Image (tube, rainbow, N blue to C red):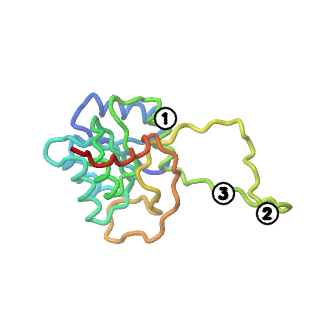
Amino acid sequence: MSGKVLVVDDSLTIRQLVTETLTEEGFDVLEATDGHDAMSKLVSRSDIALVMCDINMPGMNGLELVAKARRLGSEIIFVMLTTEAHPELMERARRLGVKGWMLKPVKPRLLGPAVKSLLEPSPAPPAPDSSSGRPAPPADLTSKRPAAPPVLTSKRPKALGALSSKRSSVAAEMATKSLLPPKPPSLPPRRP
């Protein structure tokens, strides 16, 4: 796998569980105990491709970490791993460019496929069938792809390197499958 995964959580138990699970899946994993620790690792290392981060941590929380990284020009992929499911927090994360939202308790079987789907480039669309002009069908219609993580945006940055002062202007389309429930319809105002 290219690039390291940084796991940021103030809970030792969660860090160990996520680190062990991702290591067994073949990822090279680093750990940070809070947002400040994570920021120092992001600034000093150029090999971090993805950050799995809790929101509620002392010092610098997860969304503050993402905001600071973005202000410094980072396009590293962030996935929030949290107990929070508030739509306002999810929307704030979306605006900051967070790519996924996974709820605790962690389901280890979902971690590897989620990280893989975010780090691997999206497959190219099938070439059109020369006789009909329609896309060719996939080679294997029976294979089941692992569930993608909850996707909060539709863009994936081209560069996954460390913090830099330049923003990439090119973004590749990312898988749109989501584990998040669809946004609930707005309710009409209550009448007295």
Which one is in front in this view, the residue at disc 1 or the one at disc 3? 3
Q: How far apart are marks 1 and 2 (CA)?
A: 40 Å
Q: State left or right for residue 29 relative to residue 89.
A: right
Classify 10 Å Cα crowding around label 2: few (below 14), some (14-19), many (20 and above). Answer: few
Task: Please name the amino acid that badge 2 sits on.
Answer: Gly
| Crowd tier of the residue under label 1, counting other residues whose Cα lies within 10 Å: few below 14, some 14–19, many 20 or above | some
**In the image, farthest residue toward the right:** 131
Residue where numbered disc 1 is placed: 25
Mark toward the start of the polypeptide (1 vs 2): 1
Q: Do the residues labelled 1 and 2 touch (CB within 8 Å)?
A: no
Q: Which numbered circle lies on residue 133?
A: 2
Point out which mark residue 125 bears: 3
Q: How far apart are marks 2 and 3 (CA)?
A: 13 Å
Q: Position of residue 174 (x, y in %)?
A: 51, 55
Total residue callouts: 3
Residue at x-position 48% and y-position 44%: 178
Task: Find the residue positioned furthest to the front.
Answer: 192
Q: Which of 22 and 128 is in front in this view?
A: 128
Label 1, label 3: how far apart the Cα atoms are:
27 Å
- The amino acid type, in three-letter code, at marker 3 is Pro
Q: Residue furthest left?
A: 59
Front disc: 1 or 2? 2
Residue 29: x and y in percent read 38, 41
Compared across the picture, whether 112 is left or right of 10 comes to right
Mark identifier at residue 101: none
Amino acid, disc 1? Glu
Relative height, residue 44 to residue 90 (above, below): below
